[in-house]
Amino acid sequence: MTSRSAEKDNSWSEFIKDIKEQPQKIAVEKPLKKITVKRNLSIPHALTIGKANGMDKSTEKKFRQSKFEIEAALDLHGFRESEAFEKVNAFIKTSYALNRRCILIISGKGEVLKEALPRWLKSEELSPFILSSRHPEPTLGGTGALYILLRRKRP
């Protein structure tokens, strides 16, 4: 390394020494207690995007016609896959704990999160909270988002 390169490296190191990464602000509440959902383990939850999964006809029609008001939304733009999963996990569990019925998760149209989100929703960890999901109208994100109907919280 020439002295000029070493001098540049030292200058750069000196310049960035006080720079600290700023935490991202995310509007996702954390549940106050662990939430568990009991379900019949002999029947696996078969969540399929765009399909009515055991809903009554009235609820199915209302969901298909976007008649449920979106009570909360999570935008995953800018997150890595591992970070996004943590956000989705906390968001769904928190929404369920707060008795929200309909939520929206925006994954964006990039392939990684767009393909990962449905897989996460089908997981044993999250599927007990979800009654159904589908892509919303283009004005709400189209194929880059999921309109999700959460199960009712039963006593």
Image (spheres, rainbow, N blue to C red):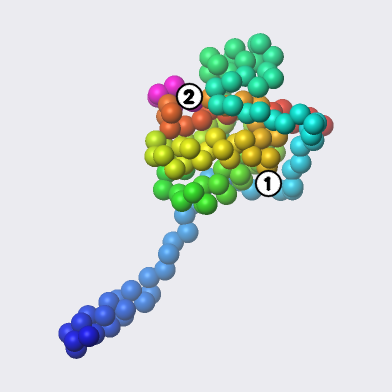
Is 9 above or below relative to 149? below
Residue 92 part of the magenta-drawn span: no
Task: Check disc 2 and report the residue beneath it.
Answer: 136
Which residues, given as a range, are shown in magenta?
135-140
* Relative side of 132 to 109, left or right: right
Instruction: Residue 40: name its quadrant.
Output: top right
How would you rate the neighbour count of disc 2 (Cα within 10 Å): few for under 14, some for 14-19, many for 20 or more?
Answer: many
At horizontal 53% and vertical 18% (from top left) the residue drawn is 66
Compared to 5, does 100 lie above or below?
A: above
Q: Nearer the viewer, mark 2 or mark 1?
A: 2
Q: Position of residue 30 (x, y in %)?
A: 64, 48
Instruction: Name the residue: 43% across, 28% down.
Output: 143
Residue shown at the point (51%, 47%) measured from the top left: 84
Tell which circle, 2 or 1, labels the residue nearer the N-terminal end: 1
Question: What amino acid is labelled 1 in the image?
Answer: Pro
For the residue pair 122 and 92, the one nearer the viewer reads as 122
Specify the label residue 31 is tagged with. 1
Q: Is residue 76 or residue 123 the one in the foreground?
A: 123
Q: Is residue 138 magenta?
A: yes
Mark on residue 112? none
Residue 114's x, y, as percent? 46, 37
In the current view of this chain or complex, which residue is farthest to the bottom?
A: 3
Q: Is residue 97 visible?
A: yes
Q: Secondary structure at mark 2?
A: loop
Q: Amino acid at mark 2?
A: Pro
